[in-house]
Image (spheres, coloured by chain):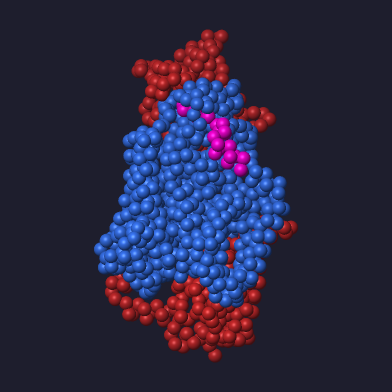
Chain colours: A blue, B red
Amino acid sequence: MNPVEFLRRHPAVLVLVVLAPVIAAAWRYLPLSTAIRAVFLVVAFLTSVAVFYATNRADGGDGTDAPEREIRGSDWTYAKILTIAAGLAICATVWLGSRAPWVAAFLGLGYLAVAYQLRRDAAPTALLYELVLLFAVPLFAKFLTTGLYFGGGDVLRHVTFVNRMLDAGSVLAIQPSAYWMYPGFHLLVGSFAELLGLTTYDAMVLTGLVAYSALVPLVYLTVRALWGDEAVAFGTVIAFTLLLVLKPYVLAFYPQALAVAMLFVGVYLNASLFTAETARAARRYAAVVPLLAVAMATTHHLTFVIALVPLGLLLGLLVVQRGVAASDFRSALSRASNVQVVYAFPLLIAAVVLFAYWLYTPSIFLTRMVGGLVTFFVLTTGGGEGGGIFLYGVGLVTDDVRTAIRWLYSPDGIYYALLSGLLLVAFYETVQHWRRHLDRMPLLATGLILSGLLLPLPLPVPWLDRIRLLVAIVAVFPLGVALSRLARTNPRYPRYAVGALVLIAAGASASFAAPVARDLDSLHTDKQRVQIEYGEREYRTVQSLSSFLDDHAATTNTGTQLIRNTFLSEGYRGSSIGLSPEEDGMSAAAGLMIVREEWTDHKLLLVDGSQVTISDDRFAVAEARRNKVYESGGTSLFWSDSEFVGVFGRSETASGNATPAAQNGTAA
Amino acid sequence: MSWTRTAVGMVGERTPVDLGVIAAWTVLSAAWAVTVGNAIQLVTAVLALPILLVFPGYVAVAALFPESSDPASDGSRGDARRTAGSSPGISPLERAVLSVFTSLLVVPLAALATNFTPWGIGPATILFAVSLVTLVGTAGATVRRFGVPPDRQFGWAVDDLEAAGRSGRNPVGTISRAMAGESTAATALNVVLVVVVVAAVGSVAQAVVLDNGPGYTETYLLTENESEGLVAAGYPTNLTAGESTPLIVGVQNHHSRASEYTIVAQLQRVESSGNATGASSNATRASENATEVVETQSVGEFDRRLAPGERALVDHAVTPELTGDRLRLTYLVYRGEPPAEPSAANADSEVHLWVGVSGNESGASQLIGASRLSGTNTLSQASQLSGPSSRACQMVCS
């Protein structure tokens, strides 16, 4: 066996050669806690090797291409059982007020059933239905157990915009925000809220849940069109349900999340156009493109600019592929040659619509773009001052060895190890069966290259969450190829269980990792974190406070970004003044100052960009020693007839000695 | 002549039933919204949901793809890699998915159009715009479908339904046959499925609609200002012993049940065992800053019964007897009877003001009504002397 053939059959050797010095360097040069976290890469490698060889063909994994597998059948028994399990999980969640054990049990059962059916005859629609359940039920259970999930705060802003727009009956009411030029999201959510009689937040969650659940069969259809292979199609759908980066934005639905869903639709339409056999069929798909373009143009701007990065990479790889495998590429193109002119026209219209609209809004769009790029540059190069960090009564949290080890076996650590492992399996599969994937090689390579951004990074990257949302669109393809090996494995092959177990663990950890389940404290290692959701009661107390201030006060020190955004969404009409964190304590103008017991459980983001952490003791002392003229639940108002000085006492960390970037500079 | 032929006899046997149902549903929903509105919210929502989520996209896709899918397709898989000459129709799954996403594209654009009307964006205009788009789409889809040979048309026509009725291929017949052929285990599974789904829907409805989580009590202090009315400002900071100062304490019941509230007002002399500002440089030292109430004077006790959502504003006079530079005027709120020794720790809710109380030149006894917490000579006169005074009144507001 020559070396090339050996590497094709055992591509893990290639990874080992690269990974070994990287791990060695990490242990040598990185802090011990960071190096320990990097162990997830070792776990990923071992997992990938286990899955790769376990799902090799039963005939010994000789590297020959297995025939494409058709998944057929009409049995809905498993779908019914999973529906019952989902219903029981929902009932238990509602009745007992917690979701973790029931959802975990449902996910375990669900992914086991899916893995089992993948190697047997199953009704494709039943399997898709089961995957929709596996995607949606954990998120719906979270909706039921959290009052109001607002993620980074954008949700509250957009609730405000929708409410303002509906109250005034005009998109102009969204001003001064630039979203009055891009009101597609707000119009969609507003329509659901008004016609279904829902609150704006509930309408937001409903549209997010519907749109992203409907993406499950859409991804299937897309991959069916591109690969013509059901194993890859189902693998990709499973990968979609596993992608942690998408899940938080289903509940914290906001314009970019809708724009990303539209991009998925765009990918599907393009895939259908490319694979349409007749001009007549292509023309019909093409007719939807201008509609999509108009909707995209009026929904979000930044998404489509960031999308140029993966699109550019994809086009570049296509050019390279054309040079390397000219004959294969020509054959691929020839299949679509009879429809190119037809679909090029609506695509052209779409491009014109997008650019015409963006040129129509130059003052907003271009200013935002330039501003965003400057911010990106400044933050990336470390030139940004940012707000300071103030620690009243608590020490700076450092990433110690114990925390790092705990992270490895937390849902986050398990998820990232398995995600990395599956990406490696995708690489092995692509190398081993390169002929099978040749036509889609640029797409797979784009996904594999960019999917590195989905892994924990040791440095803060500006806009990473926004970028990751877009990376998800291409990352599902290599992950789907990796998971398709499950469907190709001989049904009687016992080592198949390895892949199934990995799938179950990945499915469960993806629903309990920190980005999607921060409310489940005991599962996560990052304790000093920004508040991203209100409990039901907590939200009502803040609403009560907003109403009280509206009735009895013209001005208040709202202080935190969260309270300011919440008050905006509640239609608070008074003036808001920020708090000023200082070394000797927080200060504020005379009058009323909002304080909340939740502050002791979270890192506060103040309006000026500062980060503040307050201990229970300091909070209790301040509460006892200041004038407290209002209380509802854990929300209070301090009052002073002179300027507030030294509230919460002296900071443990001087301003500017630590930056938010430094504090966040740990992996994950 | 069958009922279906009677109903649509004028428009022929190939009348598209699916498109007809959509048109009728849309018109009915609009009529319902105009006549009944949101009076019965659940019905309104049920009628509106498909109009937002399915119908606009469905008719658009029906207009684009009037043909049925290739019979070779099992109807569930996307048959994108169609062979040349096959039907340009799409599978039911593809049609369903496209319908949802096209609706999500159409609805905001239809709503946007209402922005440029004199009536602006609102429930009626959105419903009208989406309904209009749906009806126009329905007309277009009908025309397109009639352009396709009957045997290749997608959807259900009147004569299809008649044929299905004659052969027993209607939904009821299909379900009956399916159930008749099922094993006991399969039947049991179906029964469990229905029970669990009903239970889950009921639980969710209860959680979303009925249950607002645990309640809380809202408590606050206000002053009365001639120009602005009741305001959260201008609180007294200096009082004089024996002289009355007006203050308003508000309590609102945010629990799901009516509650008997007791407000215990006290003037407290407090000693601290640590740094008064909490400006400790060491976190652990902050805990030393505990406060201890060493002397207390009852200022008043007020009882109010409040229904859910109801609030009481208790306008009363504070007549201090204790003197000192820094005393704490505390209002402890309890649901039900207060404990023997009321304190912030055992209150449901608590607010307080720090005040300085200077002695009265008339030399009135400063200790009437005051008691040492540690002592046994608690004077019950306290509440009589400085409790709900003649000036006190109550306002109960919903």
> What is the quadrant of the N terminus of chain A in the image?
bottom left
User: Which region of the structure is painted magenta?
Assistant: A373-392
User: Is B290 on the left or on the right of B46, as rendered?
Assistant: left
Task: Please determine whether, in this image, residue A617 is positioned above or below residue A423.
Answer: above
> What is the quadrant of the C terminus of chain A in the image?
top left
User: Is B211 on the left or on the right of A61, as rendered?
Assistant: right
In percent of the image, x 32 and y 52: which residue is there?
Answer: A47
Task: Please determine whether, in this image, residue A540 is positioned above or below residue B130.
Answer: above
> Which of the 4 quarters of the picture holds residue B378?
top left
* Residue A14 appears in the rendering: yes
> Residue A636 placed where, x, y %?
51, 32
In percent of the image, x 53 and y 59: which residue is there?
Answer: A320
In percent of the image, x 54 and y 55: which residue is there?
Answer: A313
Residue B3 falls inside the magenta stretch: no
Q: Nearer the viewer, residue A286 or A619?
A: A286
In percent of the image, x 42 and y 28: which residue is there?
Answer: A394
> Residue B130 placed where, x, y %?
63, 65
User: Is B178 on the left or on the right of A580, as rendered?
Assistant: left
The number of numbered discs placed on residues in the rendered structure image is: 0
> Residue A179 placed where, x, y %?
64, 49
* Residue B201 appears in the rendering: no
Residue farthest along the right direction in this orientation: B118
Task: Please determine whether, in this image, residue B206 is positioned above or below residue A368.
Answer: below
Residue farthest along the bottom direction in this orientation: B1
User: Is B153 on the left or on the right of A624, as rendered?
Assistant: right
Task: Please determine whether, in this image, residue B173 is positioned above or below residue A416.
Answer: below
> Residue A199 placed where, x, y %?
55, 52
Q: Nearer the viewer, residue A384 or A434?
A: A434
Residue A374 falls inside the magenta stretch: yes
Q: Nearer the viewer, residue B187 or A665?
A: A665
Q: Nearer the viewer, residue A110 or A71?
A: A71
